Image (tube, coloured by chain):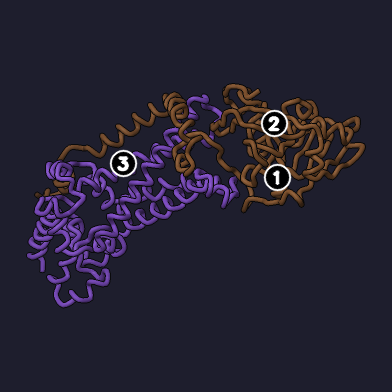
Amino acid sequence: MAEATKRPPEPASSPAAERAGVSDGALGPRRASSQATPKAAALQLLRFDVAERVVHWANAILFAILMATAGVLYLPPLSAAVGRRQLVVTIHVYAGLILPVPLVLGIVGRRWGRRLRSDLRRLNRWIPEDRVWVRRRGWRPERVTGLKQGKFNAGQKLNAAFTGGAMLLMLATGSIMHWYKPWPLSWRTGATFVHDWVAIALFFTITGHILFAFSDRESLDSMWSGNISRAWAKKRAPKWLDEELAKSRAAASRDAPST
Amino acid sequence: MVGTHGRVDAEAIGTPIGRRVVLGMLGLGVAGILGGARVQDALNTVLSPLEAADPTGLSQLIPAAGGFRIYSVTGSLPSSSPADYRLTVGGMVDRPLTLTLADLKSMAPTTLVKDFQCVTGWRVPMVHWTGVKLSTVLDEAGVQPGGAALRFESFDGTYTESLTIDQGRRPDVLVAYEMLGAPVTRQHGGPVRMYVAPMYGYKSCKWLSKISVVSKVEAGYWERFGYDIDGWVGRSNGRSDKATT
């Protein structure tokens, strides 16, 4: 765990350094080069903690299973090639029911969910820079050079909100389709309609998400290691970098008298 | 920028757009559940002719744009050549039969042009079917007294279906060897499949290999997973589709 290895326990009243997430612990391959001084180590920022990364990759695996089985159920040539309809349905239904579990577990954990909750708050809230990002169509990074963005850009915020809403819709409509007995026929048809179109939209947003991830390898790597360089933050999330630096300075000044 | 205690201020400022997006989607979702059936009908009306004229098959990617979907409950699609094909008729009959495709074609043919309705919602209008009335085959074999039901088996080795004798003797129940104006393809259950016109598609056993006369109805494959045994279109499975008869 990143935070546990970071520094000697602080007084209970000042977990600021922990929140600051300035990582000088033994984390990730990049740390080897910056081991010399604690200052150099702080060139790495903790972007995602272990709980967030576990939730992310659990979601990724479940989404992959859902999309693969959906393709088999939905596309005639794949249906014909794979067959085994009952088995495929069962896998799809169970994967769908499990999908919200990692996220919910990640959020409710009082300690381990702290960072995930904090990032969800950031994803929810839009600052004026986010509107600029949308106006400039900032999915090409060069269009928003110098824009004082927070930890997440507007595209990431929209993607997170859409994916969250889609998970709720897919769970509700999928349940109506699977446990169809109590519902009127027009609701069943309507639920199928919503399930189909949201699935198509998810296919495109997830494909886009993956393409964006591969266009920024450092960002993708940080979803494995948890850490990202200050240089990256300065370019892509300058406002977040400022916050992190301010927090680590505040933590350092509180620590100073006791050392 | 930093609160002295509690949450970092930076997280709490700004408009909660994310929440609005999620709530807006949920509202649209409810509207879609309540009104999607009507939108889907309109889409089908617009898309069906397009789909029928689409040689690429790409329109199949549009949800429920019409056309057949291919459902198989086993691994790969089963296959049997027209020359090797055999249909056996057994159970409580006077004369057990083993029929080749040529035998079936030598019996009086019947052609029907009727809709095919799947219990999952899709419907293909005005499909041409040609085959032998099931009642003709049953008369050929001679149903013994006490034979009250029929059991159909597929040469996929897994799928089974059922009808009562009375249902099976209806004039719109065929042992079909032509569909859509050509021999029944492997995908659609060829060389020979059932077509039970008044019932949902799952009652029309594909890749038909055996018909047995039995004393009482045995639930078929999907019926063991909850579908109605008497699968009348519009009067079963909680659906109200227009009848296909």
Q: Nearer the viewer, mark 1 or mark 3?
A: 1
Residue placed under numbered mark 1 in the picture: B191
In the image shown, does A76 or A172 lie closer to the viewer? A76
Q: Locate residue A90, reporting x and y percent.
A: 55, 46
- Kind of residue indicated by mark 3: Phe
Q: Would residue B117 be found to the left or right of residue A143 on screen?
A: right
Q: Quadrant of the C terminus of chain B?
A: top right
Label 1 vs 2, first from the N-terminus: 1
What residue is shown at x 40% (from left), y 29% (from top)?
B32
Q: Locate residue A157, reporting x and y percent.
A: 24, 45
What residue is shown at x 33% (from left), y 56% (from top)?
A51
Marks 1 and 3 sit apart, C-alpha to C-alpha, by 47 Å
Q: Taking the image as drawn, is residue A127 in sight?
A: no
For disc 2, the chain is: B
Q: Locate residue B225, reporting x and y percent.
A: 63, 39
Chain drawn brown, letter? B
- Kind of residue indicated by mark 2: Val
Q: Locate residue B98, reporting x and y percent.
A: 84, 45
What residue is shown at x 60% (from left), y 49% (from top)?
A84
Element under label 3? helix
Q: Which mark is residue B196?
A: 2
Chain drawn purple, letter? A
For disc 3, the chain is: A
Q: Nearer the viewer, mark 2 or mark 3?
A: 2
Asked if disc 2 and disc 3 are in contact, CB closer than 8 Å, the reply is: no
- Kind of residue indicated by mark 1: Pro
Few, some or many residues within 10 Å of mark 3 (<14, 14–19, 20+): many
Asked if disc 1 and disc 3 are in contact, CB closer than 8 Å, the reply is: no
Residue placed under numbered mark 3 in the picture: A162
Marks 2 and 3 sit apart, C-alpha to C-alpha, by 44 Å
